[in-house]
Image (tube, rainbow, N blue to C red):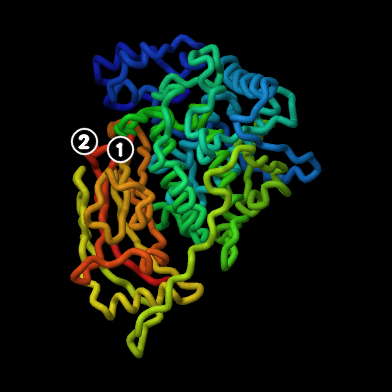
């Protein structure tokens, strides 16, 4: 096993006392919540965060993935609708995964290395495999789909049941914005679905500003794949709406629901998130919503990218035969045809069955005679970055009648979108951030609900690691918000100013004690 201790932890006397608390203790059941609490310093928790994320050696030339087209289609169900037999089968699969790690810790299919797979492709992971960043861009959905599929097939092989399928946690369904019971019953190490680093109980509810109807409607109403799921990759890419909230918000909520910050392993940190079995149920719902978005009525219809740069991108994993396997994005796009699974819709009434396409804007007022087909309205530019404070941050830009007319005309033009961009978002890798974004609501505060007409979306940053001692770099990302409908429906404040207000928040919508986020540029563009 590679050394997973940070430099700081190796030289911290307090952390020395906790060194015995390793990943093996989690599996064996000797690590209690009390032990975790007594060793909760950042340095000690670094023991639980992988420092080296490379796959186990030897890694050979990958074998191309072969779609399982002859297999029957498996059905993924809501975890809230599993029967007793299905819950027992789920627990048996994860018990076998943990047992494999205990008996054969070098096996790439075991619990520890399965948890590390997510870290291989994470921002800032040391010694990660050479490959694209799978967050902050358009590889987010297909990479996680491939990961879930091969993880699911490993679990099926371990219990010798080819019909096994992962459940999904449909936190978007009313009443299911709570932690799935099988993963916390019982809430101890006798349950292979349990993780001691969670901070929730049966009464805790995910706040609506993370997974509520208005958030889900906003996500499913995105007009393009780029806005919905991202485009490009890494620092030069753009993070999609679904990756921010609900995805990032649920990660933080599981680990620390009261404040959502500071970072807490496992689910609260990207480098450790997949060590919690609920990660796979959470991402199965993200994967399901990809299908829901594609089937949502819209004009033009929602569609996946057609560029070869996306379709021919490859990822590598170990499969159920312990074979180093290469799989292409193109091989996971049609999950039922090539991966042989589909989602059974939740029987409960969903919060948003299908988000309708945004209503067209009303006819524009008289526009300039020579209206440009494109435009960019600069709101703020700071090459070194502008730092947020815990208080609301409002930016103002002059919007005289001619500018208003141009925006409204472009917003009413078929096949055109008016987009609010926030580029160059910088957050230290051991910090997270949550910021609601409002258009023309300079009075917005943490009390302003996401149902407010001026709400356009949220910035959600999930930490990559627990401590900066890992030496990771500050992450850099870009986000975009479709404000086409807002241009017509949200009135400009008196005086002809257009405003963008950034409101940092934490669990329950409260003001955070601190925030470590900077941005470089905010602007509006017609695309």
- Assign the C terminus to one quadrant of the image: bottom left
Q: Is mark 1 on a helix, strand or loop?
A: loop
Mark 1 in CB contact with mark 2 (< 8 angstroms): yes
Mark 2 residue crowding within 10 angstroms, few (<14) / some (14–19) / many (20+): few
What's the residue at 59%, 29% (across, down)? 80
Does residue 97 appear in this view? yes
Along the line of sight, which residue is nearer the eye, 460 or 293? 293
Q: How crowded is mark 1: few (under 14 residues within 10 Å), some or many (20 or more)?
A: many
Where is residue 382 shown, x and y percent of the image?
Answer: 21, 60
Find residue 349 and report its horizontal and vertical position in percent.
59, 41
Q: Compared to 276, does 134 lie above or below?
A: below
At a point 38% along the width and 12% down the height, the residue shown is 20
Q: Which of marks 1 and 2 is nearer the N terminus?
A: 1
Q: In this view, does 443 lie above or below 267?
A: below
Residue at image point 55% right, 46% down: 143
Side (left or right) of 218 relative to 402:
right
Whole-angstrom CA distance, mark 1 to mark 2, is: 9 Å
- Closer-to-camera residue (217/24): 217
Res. 308 in view: no
Residue 513: assigned label: 2
Residue in the picture at 23% in, 63% down: 380
- Judged from this view, the residue extending furthest toward the bottom is 369
329 and 207: which is toward the camera: 207
Give the left or right position of residue 117, taking residue 84 as reference.
Answer: left
Q: Is residue 74 left or right of residue 239?
A: right
**Helix, strand or loop status at disc 2:** loop
Q: Is residue 114 above or below residue 232?
A: above
x and y percentages locating residue 47 in the rendered image: 37, 22
Determine which quarter of the picture holds residue 410: bottom left
Residue linked to disc 1: 506
């Amino acid at each position: 096993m590679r050394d997973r201790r940070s430099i700081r932890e190796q030289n911290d006397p307090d952390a020395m006392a906790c060194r015995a608390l390793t990943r093996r203790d989690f599996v064996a059941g000797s690590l209690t919540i009390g032990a975790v609490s007594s060793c909760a310093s950042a340095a000690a928790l670094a023991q639980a965060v992988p420092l080296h994320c490379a796959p186990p050696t030897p890694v050979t030339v990958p074998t191309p993935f072969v779609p399982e087209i002859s297999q029957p289609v498996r059905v993924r169900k809501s975890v809230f609708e599993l029967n007793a037999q299905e819950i027992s089968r789920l627990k048996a699969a994860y018990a076998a995964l943990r047992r494999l790690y205990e008996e054969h810790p070098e096996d790439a299919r075991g619990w520890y290395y399965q948890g590390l797979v997510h870290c291989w492709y994470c921002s800032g992971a040391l010694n990660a495999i050479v490959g694209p960043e799978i967050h902050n861009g358009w590889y987010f959905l297909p990479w996680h789909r491939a990961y879930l599929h091969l993880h699911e097939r490993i679990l099926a092989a371990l219990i010798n049941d080819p019909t096994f399928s992962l459940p999904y946690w449909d936190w978007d369904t009313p009443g299911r914005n709570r932690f799935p019971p099988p993963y916390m019953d019982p809430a101890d190490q006798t349950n292979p679905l349990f993780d001691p680093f969670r901070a929730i109980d049966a009464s805790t509810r995910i706040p609506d500003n993370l997974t509520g109807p208005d958030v889900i409607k906003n996500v499913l109403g995105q007009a393009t794949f780029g806005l919905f799921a991202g485009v490009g990759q890494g620092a030069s890419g753009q993070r999609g709406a679904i990756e921010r909230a609900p995805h990032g918000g649920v990660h933080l909520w599981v680990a620390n629901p009261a404040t959502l910050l500071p970072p807490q392993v496992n689910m609260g940190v990207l480098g450790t998130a997949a060590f919690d079995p609920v990660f796979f149920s959470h991402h199965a719902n993200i994967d399901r919503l990809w299908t829901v978005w594609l089937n949502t009525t819209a004009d033009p219809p929602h569609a996946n990218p057609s560029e070869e740069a996306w379709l021919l991108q490859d990822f590598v994993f170990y499969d159920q035969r312990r074979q180093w396997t290469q799989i292409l994005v193109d091989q996971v796009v049609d999950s039922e045809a090539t991966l042989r699974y589909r989602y059974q819709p939740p029987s409960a009434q969903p919060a948003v069955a299908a988000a309708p396409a945004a209503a067209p804007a009303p006819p524009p007022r008289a526009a300039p005679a020579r209206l440009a087909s494109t435009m960019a309205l600069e709101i703020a530019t700071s090459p070194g970055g502008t730092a947020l404070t815990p208080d609301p941050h409002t930016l103002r830009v002059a919007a005289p009648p001619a500018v208003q007319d141009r925006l409204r005309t472009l917003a009413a033009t078929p096949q055109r979108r008016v987009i609010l961009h926030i580029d160059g978002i910088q957050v230290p890798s051991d910090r997270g951030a949550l910021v609601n974004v409002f258009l023309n609501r300079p009075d917005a505060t943490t009390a302003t609900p996401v149902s407010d007409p001026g709400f356009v979306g949220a910035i959600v940053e999930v930490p990559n690691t627990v401590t900066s001692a890992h030496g990771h770099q500050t992450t850099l990302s870009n986000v975009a918000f479709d404000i086409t409908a807002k241009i017509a429906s949200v009135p400009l404040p008196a005086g002809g100013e257009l405003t963008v207000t950034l409101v940092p928040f934490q669990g329950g919508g409260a003001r955070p004690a601190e925030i470590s986020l900077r941005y470089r540029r905010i602007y509006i563009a017609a695309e």
